[in-house]
């Protein structure tokens, strides 16, 4: 991160035309800025949820008649997504050591867990018994979980690219900034889910 | 199976198809082995009006979904121009990015880091 960590350039070497890249790679800075904007985006969605919840009389914030929330299934999905964050990090640690085989393995497992989460969420949606048009609860529930699901899908697209590139041997211990960037995004999506899960299923 | 469940099934299949296409494209593109390091310095994209075109397209699509008759999925007079504009802007953006990438690779791009 600091200029001090860079090795000093010998004086006899001609001064380079372009500055040597120092500190965090620009791709990671870009990903951090993107995640910061995503935090604001989800902040807006949470604010909408709490506003809608505060507008109804106490104790009446619940799924529309005929609908229900499936806490056990949501808990299983939470475990799946949290586990996928661990497998992602194992992949990052592997490529930092230069272990491309383990990177492929852990990225593949992470992608599979992400897809499993999405399938589970769609199954959950089809069983809830209420839709996005069914009152403020239905609207805010589907908006919050749906946008999160879209982000999981975006992360899965990134993971698919990482996996494909890893299989072509494009990453090494020195050169794997895309893996780091996708892992940052994946952890962010995981953290957001924990907030969504806690808010919807426990702050009743 | 209810209509909603069928819709979610279609959505799930579409997601898997998109993931498969992305994986297939990423598997074919680029050389085997490590990529050469990108040139040092800051690369800024060229000025472009495509972001604005994208926003206009998104606005048309959003308006098309909002201002529709009850029996319609979307207002065709807003939705179709919006989708056409979106696809054109996306194609233009990918072409511009590829063009810039080739410029950088072939060294036509001189960036001393001071001009920006």
Image (cartoon, coloured by chain):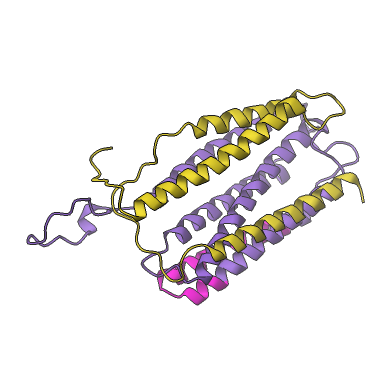
Chain colours: A purple, B yellow
Q: Nearer the viewer, residue A182 or B70?
A: B70
Work out whether B23 lies above or below A199: below
Q: Main secondary structure of the magenta part?
A: helix
For residue B43, side relative to residue B89 (left or right): left
Q: In the displayed image of the protein, which residue is found farthest to the left?
A: A12
* Residue B103, percent from left and from top: 36, 50
Q: Relative to A69, is A110 above or below?
A: below
Would residue A186 be seen by someone viewing this image from the given angle?
A: yes
Q: Dividing the image into 4 quarters, which one contains the C terminus of chain B?
A: top left
Judge whether residue A79 can be spotted in this image. no
Instruction: Give the residue displayed 51% in from the left and 56% down from the top.
Output: A182
| Residue B61 horizontal side relative to residue A108, left or right | right
* Residue nearest the viewer, comparing B11 with A91: B11
Q: Residue shown at 35%/57% (left/top)?
A: B38
Residue at left offset 63%, top offset 52%: A152
**Closest to the observer, A87 or B29:** B29
Range drawn in magenta:
A76-105
Relative placement, left or right, of B11 versus B85 is right
Q: Quadrant of residue A6?
A: bottom left
Q: Is residue A83 magenta?
A: yes
| Residue A114 spot, x, y in % from top left | 65, 59
Q: Name the spot of residue A27 as percent of width and height, x first.
A: 41, 51
Q: Nearer the viewer, residue B109 or A46?
A: B109
- Where residue A19 appears, as percent x and y from the top left, is 22, 50
Whether residue B102 appears in magenta in the rendering, the answer is no
């Amino acid at each position: 991160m600091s200029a001090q960590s860079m090795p000093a350039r010998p004086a006899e070497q001609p001064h380079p035309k372009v500055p040597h890249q120092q500190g965090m790679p620009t791709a990671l800075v870009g990903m951090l800025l993107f995640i910061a904007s995503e935090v604001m985006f989800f902040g807006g969605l949470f604010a909408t949820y709490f506003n809608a919840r505060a507008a109804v009389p106490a104790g009446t914030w619940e799924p529309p008649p005929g609908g229900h929330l499936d806490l056990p299934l949501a808990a299983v999905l939470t475990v799946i997504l949290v586990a996928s964050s661990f497998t992602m990090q194992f992949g990052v640690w592997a490529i930092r050591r230069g272990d491309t085989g383990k990177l492929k393995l852990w990225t593949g497992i992470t992608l599979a867990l992400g897809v499993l989460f999405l399938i589970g969420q769609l199954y959950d949606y089809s069983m809830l018994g209420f839709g996005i048009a069914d009152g403020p609860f239905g609207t805010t529930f589907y908006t919050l979980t749906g946008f999160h699901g879209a982000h999981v899908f975006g992360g899965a697209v990134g993971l698919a690219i990482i996996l494909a590139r890893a299989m072509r041997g494009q990453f090494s211990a020195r050169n794997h900034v895309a893996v780091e960037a996708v892992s940052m995004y994946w952890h962010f999506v995981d953290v957001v889910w924990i907030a969504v899960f806690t808010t919807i299923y426990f702050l009743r | 199976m209810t209509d909603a469940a069928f819709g979610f099934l279609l959505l799930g299949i579409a997601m898997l198809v998109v993931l498969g296409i992305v994986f297939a494209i990423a598997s074919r593109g680029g050389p085997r082995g490590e990529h050469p390091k990108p040139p040092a310095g800051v690369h800024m994209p060229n000025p472009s009006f495509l972001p604005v075109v994208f926003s206009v397209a998104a606005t048309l699509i959003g308006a098309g979904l909002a201002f529709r008759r009850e029996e319609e999925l979307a207002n065709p007079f807003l939705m179709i121009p919006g989708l056409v504009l979106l696809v054109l802007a996306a194609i233009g953006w990918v072409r511009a990015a590829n063009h810039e990438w080739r410029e950088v690779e072939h060294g036509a791009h001189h960036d001393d880091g001071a001009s920006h």
